[in-house]
Image (cartoon, rainbow, N blue to C red):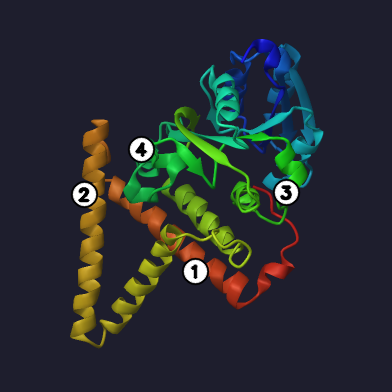
Amino acid sequence: MSMREFPKVSIVISARNEERYLGECLESIAAQTYPHELIELLLVDSASEDRTRDIMEDFARKADINVKILSNPRGDTPRGLNTGIKAATGELIMFMSAHSYMPENHIERAVKILYEKDADGVSCRLKSIGSGMGKVWDDVIAAAMESPVGLGNVKARVGRKAGWVDNPMFALYRRELFERFGYLDERLTRNQDYEFNQRCYQGGARFWFQPDLVVYYHNRPTLRALWRQYFNSAFWRAFMVGQFGRAIRLRHLVPPAFVVVLFLSALFALVSKFWLSVFLCIFGLYVITIILGAAIEAVKRKKARIFPLLPIAFATIHFAFGVGMIAGLVKFVLLGKRKYIKAAVKQ
């Protein structure tokens, strides 16, 4: 593909109170090897209360790429992204998070792969790098986010083999997908991209995953923030039950099933030695699994200091997702509250 054949790429970033990371993200875009006259950057300020908009405006003054600064007074992610998408003029559209940055050849490679594979979208692998805040949990949470013990077989996190996927992350999309399948669902506080991807995939769209195409992502800095992330992710995943046949996978059901079985066996153990044995067996196997997973990650990363804390991070992800999925199923499926959700909330 010659330079004159390169299509225009619109990058959409919706940011709310992202003064800590936004500058790094924008500098990685400014350093791209892709022709800068063919890059359009749409920065959506989603009701920020810090210096986020100042950083956007300062970058726009200095950048040699076309920058548009837009506003999303509602402050939520799906409305912010849709605001950017609707203002985009590129043939290709790419989502970025203010929490992330990319290598200088990322866009160039993604575009080439998209056309070589005749794909509708190209997905990268997310590489967790810690919050950058010097927190004790930085390396621990980053390791948990990239371990099969922590997240199962999520390709964008643990995948090492290229191939077709149904849920691309931080993807480069063909513009026509939004024209064919509509925009992001503005009711969803979380999982907006997942819902959109499922809509496209079940409509026949084809997404290619390239594991050596990497975006670096600053993960949550504390266990509390990690719990909130995975609770909300599971809660809003349950919102999609009944809408898409493949929206809920086996890996999504394992954590809630584990939480229910563990809770019931612990409850019955109060009156039965048999159920006490069942509880101890289940809990014991789980503890052994997360300890072995922690040992493997510590050895692989050559960081022995993460070993004692990594099982706690694993358990946080598992129980947060399990409890969040149960809460979501109760609210949206059993109680039928989905019809009352009108708009996502600020994040």
Compute the Cα span from label 4 to label 2. Answer: 21 Å
Mark 3 falls on what kind of element?
helix
Task: In the displayed orientation, state which residue is furthest to the bottom.
Answer: 271
Q: Is residue 238 left or right of residue 74?
A: left
Specify the label residue 292 is tagged with: 2
Q: Earlier in the sequence, mark 1 or mark 2?
A: 2
Q: Give the labeled residue for mark 4.
A: 136
Q: How many residues crowd mark 2 within 10 Å: few (<14), some (14–19), many (20+)? A: some
Compute the Cα span from label 4 to label 3. Answer: 43 Å
Compute the Cα span from label 4 to label 1. Answer: 30 Å
Measured along the vertical axis of the image, is residue 286 above or below residue 117? below
Would you say the residues marked 4 and 3 are in contact, meaning their CB atoms lie under 8 Å apart? no
Q: How many residues crowd mark 3 within 10 Å: few (<14), some (14–19), many (20+)? A: some
Q: Give the labeled residue for mark 3.
A: 181
- Tell me where residue 219 appears, x and y as whole percent: 47, 38
- Tell me where residue 328 appears, x and y as whole percent: 56, 66
Locate the N terminus and report the quarter of the image it occupies.
top right
